[in-house]
Image (cartoon, rainbow, N blue to C red):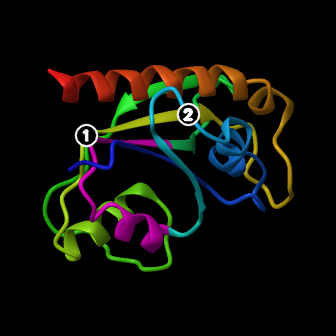
């Protein structure tokens, strides 16, 4: 039996816009209409890797992404984890470290989609910049759409 879709907010709330993932999760609270499990993992990469050992239909990572000239722009992309050896770091929360930890634990990554937001600043400090904060609702809508898509794939 599958656990459905796991929605994981990741990022460090003490580094400005890097707290995007946890803030989206905080505002979403739950997705009762889809049955997805929504969790703020913050910087707890090993916790996420262990949770991924269960049978999941899909994973949605909500994260800050590098600034490519449009702070606050929401992007949706499929995660393509590198195959082979990766730097295993039990204290890191970047997706590659989580994926490497999961592989080291004998797990397999479910279909994974990243809902990201281009940052303005990841300097020390609590709180999102204005453009990233303004993107929260758009990102939450994107997460709902992705969860619906991942769930529909399993029904086929």
Residue in the picture at 43% in, 80% down: 90
Q: Left or right of 148: which side holds 17?
A: right
Q: At which x and y percent is residue 129?
A: 83, 37
Mark 2 residue element: loop
Quarter of the image holding residue 41?
bottom right
- Looking at the image, which residue sits at the far bottom? 90
Residue in the picture at 71% in, 50% down: 19
Comparing marks 1 and 2, which lies closer to the viewer? Answer: 2
Q: Left or right of 29: which side holds 46?
A: left
In this rendering, the count of numbered labels is: 2
Q: Left or right of 87: which side holds 105?
A: left
Q: Please give the label number shown on residue 31.
A: 2
Q: Nearer the viewer, residue 152 or 90?
A: 152
- Which residue is disc 1 drawn over? 111
Q: Is residue 28 above or below residue 7?
A: above
Mark 1 residue element: loop
Q: Is residue 105 above or below residue 59?
A: below
Q: Left or right of 55: which side holds 122?
A: right
Q: Are marks 1 and 2 in contact (CB under 8 Å)?
A: no
Q: Is residue 23 above or below residue 108?
A: above
The answer to which of marks 1 and 2 sits earlier in the sequence is 2
Q: Magenta segment range? A: 45-61
Q: Is residue 49 magenta?
A: yes
Q: At which x and y percent is residue 50?
A: 36, 71
Q: Nearer the viewer, residue 86 or 13?
A: 13
Q: Please give the label number shown on residue 56.
A: none
Callout 1 environment at 10 Å: few (<14), some (14 to 19), or many (20+)? some
Disc 1 to disc 2, C-alpha distance: 19 Å
Q: At which x and y percent is residue 85?
A: 18, 69
Residue in the picture at 25% in, 40% down: 111
Q: At which x and y percent is residue 36?
A: 45, 39
């Amino acid at each position: 039996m599958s656990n459905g879709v796991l929605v994981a907010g990741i990022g460090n709330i003490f580094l400005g816009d890097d707290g995007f993932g946890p803030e989206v999760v905080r505002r979403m609270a739950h997705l009762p209409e889809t049955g997805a499990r929504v969790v703020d993992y913050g910087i707890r990469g090993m916790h996420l890797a262990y949770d991924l050992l269960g049978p999941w239909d899909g994973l949605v990572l909500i994260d800050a992404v590098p600034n490519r000239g449009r702070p606050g722009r929401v992007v949706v992309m499929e995660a393509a984890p590198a195959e082979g050896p990766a730097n295993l770091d039990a204290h890191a929360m970047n997706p590659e470290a989580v994926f490497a930890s999961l592989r080291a634990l004998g797990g397999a990554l479910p279909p994974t989609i990243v809902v990201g937001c281009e940052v303005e600043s990841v300097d020390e400090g609590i709180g999102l910049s204005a453009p990233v904060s303004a993107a929260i609702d758009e990102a939450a809508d994107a997460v709902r759409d992705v969860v619906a898509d991942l769930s529909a794939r399993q029904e086929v």
